[in-house]
Image (spheres, helix red, strand yellow):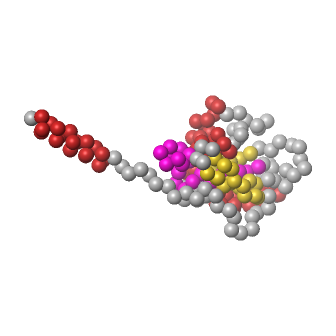
Amino acid sequence: MFLRSFLFVLVAAGLIRAADPPQLQFNIKWVNPPTKALPRGVSHKTLMSKAMGVEVGYYVYLPPSYEGSSASFPVLYWLHGAGSDENAGLPIAEMFDKAIQAGQMTPAIMVFPNGGKRSEYRDWEPQKVLPETFIIRELIPISTPITGLSRTGAAAGWKACRWAATARSNLP
């Protein structure tokens, strides 16, 4: 009887272990420098993520009126789609610049961080893929509007709500 119970426990433990899904694997290139000329006002930068222990790339768009100005500018963080990286924001920066030049948009700063392909902008602790921590705690010194497309639009809203209690705004 003892042997039968012992074998049952071993088999059950094996089945439970076999039912565990494999750990997600990410193949993320965290820094993706430009491969062609950048739109006006855009520069590529990197920031060392202390949380992940890697450099992470991002683009910054500065409106034409920024240089030499002492005015405050709103800042938007644009989150790329699931299969992209920081380069996905370049067409958005170009459209944004044209809209500002045409007087259709208020001048603002835009930041296009690399959130990692297929990361869903959430932290994956076991894999040390931590885009949420990077963006909220390392890239954004203070809370500002966040936006994105498709699934990232939902992620942006969720992040804004989740971190609202600890955030401060620099908007008037």
Outermost residue toward the top in this view: 165
Residue 38 vs 155, above or below: the answer is: below
Q: Which residues are magenta?
A: 109-130
**Between residues 34 and 1, which one lies in front from this camera angle?**
1
Residue name at image x 64 percent, y 41 percent: 136
At which x and y percent is residue 92?
Answer: 69, 58
Indicate left or right for 36 with 62 as reference.
Answer: left
Position of the C terminus by quadrant: top right
**Between residues 78 and 51, which one lies in front from this camera angle?**
51
Q: Quadrant of residue 91?
A: bottom right
Indicate left or right for 120 with 13 as reference.
Answer: right
At which x and y percent is residue 12?
Answer: 22, 42
Residue 69 vs 38, above or below: the answer is: above
Residue name at image x 64 percent, y 40 percent: 137
Residue 83 inside the magenta-drawn segment: no
At which x and y percent is residue 82?
Answer: 54, 55
Is any part of residue 156 visible from this angle?
no
Residue name at image x 47 percent, y 45 percent: 126
Is any part of residue 43 visible from this angle?
yes
Outermost residue toward the front in this view: 3
Position of the N terminus by quadrant: top left
